[in-house]
């Protein structure tokens, strides 16, 4: 950091990485961001993690796309074969007019042959425009984004049983809790600023119950650490709820007033005594009983969860159990209580709210409701579009293989790295006869593009983003985009004009105003207000209300205001370990790297801290393999294999391997299983059967 002499201007914005949504001040000199400081946003109160503080220099990286590109006629066959330093062997520079005309001509009039992947890294306005373009321009709902790969199952369970997909309380509410459960989440690495609030909570005597197959940073602060067997969440949670029923620890008054289907849940839980479930989940019955008493006995309890819960073929069932646990103990709707799926990307909440989902229009309004569609087409001045729910991320890739989808528009996502069984996803991308990619770097997905549209980094554009706390926050431009790169909303508008959609927006503020017409969640939140206040939490009850940190104090947005218990049965993971693949692979993020690494691996500090692809294994596993820490192992699944440097980590169980998915040179998703949860359609990234061996020469 420095003093005001070190910069020409400072601009308030929002960190582009995780869903915590820390507010930052960008210190700018000579059109370059020199450094970043945390400011007093509602979610961070000045705090930042290493990514927010030091991970901004990718903005000025010399790999930035600075001009539209079109695939050369003599380019080699599509594949992961473009060197960012010599891309001119594959692409040629084009003017904006030529690139946009080419993209539009290749997409126009193709209806169901076209699908779109939008982005949780773009603004709310850009997400809204993207889903509008697919629906208005192509007449269907085949539009999705990375929520499908992170919390789709949590949202499915919350929508069905609580009536709303967003958190019921901000994570800062932990300040008012006396007990909190964190399950299947590793906030110290993935939501680091939220983790600081969790740690403070324990310092003032709050009891933290951590449940995770992998030991993790919060373990040191936990009153109870339940390192359960991977994939046995339902058995463990049902056993805890069994105890609550058996010992009469539930909140009868709350259940009567605000829920339905309790008797069915109660009867179902009889089959899950902790003594029997201990053998399934690996947690002793007495510990399960102690946790049940601690959580049910709390005056105010919260439940936080992450992708360890959601990324399973039983991810929806896992979330249903958490919802039931909160409902039966009455831990919803009061200070210090609530259900909080910790959202991953900085704007995955907002992009979902804005309708970047194949089954919902903005504000989770169902596409198969005729009245809902007509409300949107009236605002859009366009014809009706399909009432059929669209295809999800993985279904779209299957439809490409089947020849039903032949062209795609990918905005800011990187399925060539992020999809499960990624070799199969890459083969699908190669099969497309037209792929438009809009991004700031020539990503792995852009390797397969026919036309590449150079976009803007967060520090180069205006727009709102919504964090895990339902806080809508204002992002502001601090520097100008490099070369010919443009703001994403501008590119979308120009493309839509060429598709004949008659769009004439001249600013994100106009888009936001249109969004408000059919999004009740934005009532009392205006562009001007956000420009002045930086953040407003939805719902906001008046033009001066900063927004409701806690919702559902007096019932739920469901019939008769009642939330629902849905019993969940045990479903085994899809990819059962066997003699050939005896170990369990789980994938995730590391503190220093973000998702597929396109930004953080181009950040000097972050890449300096974690420069090499790595996996973590228990020391006893490494000893058994004859591999020293720092040497390489070969990981193989039914889908492929990679070689990667191994680290010793006692937090990983001896039959598990943890693998970050940021590294293209050892792409984790070559190994992962594409089987999906039947409701959320989310892949089982957290459980794949693998074999681990010493790599040759290890
Ligand atoms: Fe950015 Fe998340 Fe870190 Fe905050 S906690 S600085 S939002 S990455």
Image: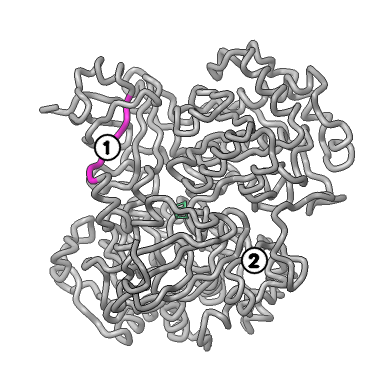
Read off the residue under disc 2.
536
Disc 1 packing (10 Å; few <14; some 14–19; many ≥20): many
Residue 628 included in the magenta stretch of the image: no
Residue 341: x %, y % from top left: 59, 45
| Residue 327 appears left or right of 668 | right
* Residue farthest toward the left in the current orientation of the protein: 697
1 or 2: mark nearer the eye? 2
List the residue tagged with mark 1: 614
Q: Going by the image, does 368 lie left or right of 402?
A: right
The label shown at residue 331 is none
Q: Does residue 6 appear to the left or right of 247 in the view shown?
A: left
- The foreground one among 319 and 617 is 617
**Residue at image x 57%, y 53%?**
468
* Quadrant position of the C terminus in the picture: top left
Magenta-highlighted residues: 611-617
Compute the Cα span from label 1 to label 2: 40 Å
Which residue occupies 41% across, 77% down? 487
Task: Give the percent coordinates (x, y) of residue 566.
Answer: 73, 36
| One can see residue 385 in this view | yes
């Amino acid at each position: 950091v420095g003093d005001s002499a070190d910069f020409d201007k400072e601009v308030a914005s929002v960190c582009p990485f995780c869903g915590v949504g820390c507010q930052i001040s960008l210190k700018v000199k000579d059109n370059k961001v020199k450094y970043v400081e945390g400011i007093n946003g509602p979610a961070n109160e000045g705090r930042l993690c290493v990514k927010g503080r030091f991970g901004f220099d990718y903005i000025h990286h010399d790999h930035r796309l600075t001009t539209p590109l079109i695939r050369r006629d003599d380019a080699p066959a599509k594949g992961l074969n473009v060197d960012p330093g010599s891309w001119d062997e594959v692409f040629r520079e084009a003017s904006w007019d030529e690139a946009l005309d080419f993209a539009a001509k290749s997409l126009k009039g193709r209806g169901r042959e076209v699908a779109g992947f939008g982005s949780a890294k773009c603004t709310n306005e850009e997400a809204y425009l993207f889903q509008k373009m697919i629906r208005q321009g192509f007449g269907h709902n085949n539009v999705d984004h990375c929520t499908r790969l992170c919390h789709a199952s949590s949202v499915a369970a919350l929508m069905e049983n609580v009536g709303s997909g967003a958190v019921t309380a901000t994570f800062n509410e932990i300040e008012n809790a006396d007990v909190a459960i964190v399950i299947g989440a590793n906030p110290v690495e993935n939501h680091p600023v939220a983790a600081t609030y969790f740690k403070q909570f324990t310092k003032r005597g709050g009891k933290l119950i951590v449940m995770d197959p992998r030991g993790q940073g919060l373990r040191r602060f936990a009153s109870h650490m339940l390192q359960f067997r991977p994939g046995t969440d339902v058995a463990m949670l049902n056993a805890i709820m069994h105890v609550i029923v058996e010992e009469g620890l539930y909140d009868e008054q709350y259940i009567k007033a605000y829920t339905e289907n309790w008797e069915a849940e109660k009867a179902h839980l009889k089959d899950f005594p902790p003594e029997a479930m201990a053998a399934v989940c690996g947690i002793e019955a007495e510990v399960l009983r102690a946790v049940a008493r601690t959580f049910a006995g709390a005056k105010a309890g919260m439940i936080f969860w992450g992708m360890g819960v959601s990324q399973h073929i039983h991810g929806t069932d896992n979330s249903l159990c958490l919802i039931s646990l909160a409902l039966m103990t009455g831990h919803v709707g009061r200070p210090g209580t609530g259900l909080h799926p910790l959202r991953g990307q900085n704007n995955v909440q907002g992009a979902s709210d804005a309708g970047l989902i194949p089954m919902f229009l903005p504000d989770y309004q169902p596409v198969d409701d005729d009245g809902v569609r007509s409300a949107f087409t009236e605002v859009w001045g366009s014809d009706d579009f399909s009432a059929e729910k669209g295809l999800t991320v993985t279904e779209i890739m299957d439809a490409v293989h089947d020849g039903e989808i032949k062209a795609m528009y990918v905005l800011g996502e990187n399925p060539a790295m992020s999809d499960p069984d990624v070799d199969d996803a890459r083969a699908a991308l190669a099969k497309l006869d037209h792929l438009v990619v809009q991004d700031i770097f020539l990503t792995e997905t852009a390797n397969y593009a026919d036309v590449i549209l150079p976009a803007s980094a967060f520090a180069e554009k205006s727009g709102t983003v919504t964090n895990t706390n339902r806080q809508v926050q204002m992002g502001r431009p601090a520097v100008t985009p490099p070369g010919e790169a443009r703001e994403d909303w501008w590119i979308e508008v120009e493309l839509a004009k060429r598709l004949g959609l008659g769009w004439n927006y001249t600013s994100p503020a106009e888009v936001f105003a249109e969004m408000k017409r059919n999004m009740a969640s934005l009532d009392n939140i205006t562009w001007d207000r956000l420009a002045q206040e930086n953040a407003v939490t939805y719902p906001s009850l008046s033009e001066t209300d900063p927004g409701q940190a806690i919702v559902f104090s007096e019932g739920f947005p469901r019939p008769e205001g009642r939330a629902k218990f849905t019993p969940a049965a045990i479903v085994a993971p899809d990819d059962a370990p066997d003699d050939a693949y005896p170990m369990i692979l789980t994938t995730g993020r590391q503190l220093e790297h973000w998702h597929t690494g396109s930004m953080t691996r181009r950040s000097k500090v972050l890449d300096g801290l974690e420069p090499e692809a790595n996996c973590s294994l228990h020391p006893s596993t490494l000893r058994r393999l004859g591999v020293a820490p720092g040497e390489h192992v070969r990981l193989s699944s039914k889908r492929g294999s990679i070689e990667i440097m191994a680290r010793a980590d006692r937090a990983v169980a001896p039959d598990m391997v943890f693998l970050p998915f940021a590294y293209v040179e050892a792409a984790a998703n070559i190994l992962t299983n594409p089987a999906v949860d039947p409701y959320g359609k989310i892949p089982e990234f957290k459980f794949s059967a693998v074999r681990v061996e010493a790599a040759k020469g290890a």
